[in-house]
Image (cartoon, helix red, strand yellow):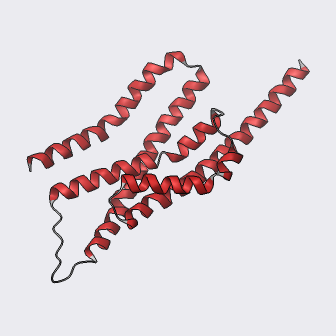
């Protein structure tokens, strides 16, 4: 029971301290950034926190009940589940962290495009490789069963596609701004 309390305390401390840690990092980095970069960083922090929270909520209310129902489906007279509190807490904490981290995928895509590290056409052409990579990462982050792996991989891939769509919208807006700036520069 003592170990379980420590695990719960560490996990809750991480969740509660996460926004403050991110705020301190932002405060440290902000003096070196331009005003538009600070705005982008603030939006990135808010988006990251919301996506982490969304991933955690998705895990708690959708994934954990599905995994528990799937696992209890194997119960027979001879086979009774003996999931202890320590194992349940470890499973829950691990899955919540995994889903919170994997839900950051759209931000990684958007940031990669915004910083010109990768272009949208390349992101579209490597979709099969990204899906396989997501499946591998999901297999590493979840318990060793196909159901939880797919429950993490499929939403993550959907978020990848959403990230491509949003990055494409940012690119279109950026191109419009560049054309407008070029016209203004020519007129001057």
In the image, taking residue 63 as reference, residue 45 lies left or right, namely: right
Tell which of 129 and 180 is nearer to you. Answer: 129
Q: Residue at x 58, y 43 (%)?
A: 109
In the image, taking residue 142 as reference, residue 8 lies left or right, namely: left
- In the rendered view, tell whether residue 117 sits above or below residue 69: above
Farthest residue to the bottom: give it. Answer: 77
In the image, taking residue 155 as reference, residue 184 lies left or right, namely: right
Instruction: Give the position of the C terminus as an image quadrant.
Output: top right
Farthest residue to the right: give it. Answer: 187
- In the rendered view, tell whether residue 148 sits above or below residue 125: below
Tell which of 183 and 3 is nearer to you. Answer: 3
Q: Residue at x 90, y 21 (%)?
A: 187
**Spot occupied by residue 103 in the image (x, y as percentages of width and height):** 46, 49
**Spot occupied by residue 56 in the image (x, y as percentages of width and height):** 37, 51
How many callouts does the rendering have? 0
- In the rendered view, tell whether residue 160 sits above or below residue 173: below
Q: Residue at x 26, y 77 (%)?
A: 74
Q: Residue at x 42, y 55 (%)?
A: 138
């Amino acid at each position: 029971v003592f170990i379980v309390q420590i695990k719960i305390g560490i996990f809750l401390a991480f969740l509660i301290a996460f926004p403050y840690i991110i705020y301190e990092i932002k405060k440290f980095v902000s003096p070196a950034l331009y005003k538009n970069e600070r705005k982008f960083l603030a939006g990135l922090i808010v988006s990251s926190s919301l996506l982490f929270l969304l991933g955690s909520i998705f895990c708690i209310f959708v994934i954990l009940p599905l995994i528990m129902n799937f696992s209890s489906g194997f119960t027979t007279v001879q086979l009774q589940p003996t999931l202890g509190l320590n194992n349940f807490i470890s499973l829950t904490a691990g899955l919540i962290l995994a889903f919170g981290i994997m839900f950051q995928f759209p931000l990684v895509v958007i940031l990669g495009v915004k910083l010109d590290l990768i272009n949208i056409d390349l992101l579209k052409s490597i979709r099969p490789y990204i899906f396989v990579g997501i499946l591998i990462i999901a297999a590493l982050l979840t318990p060793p069963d196909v159901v939880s792996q797919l429950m993490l991989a499929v939403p993550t891939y959907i978020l990848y596609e959403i990230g491509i769509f949003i990055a494409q919208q940012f690119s279109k807006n950026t191109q419009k701004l560049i054309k407008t700036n070029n016209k203004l520069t020519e007129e001057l």
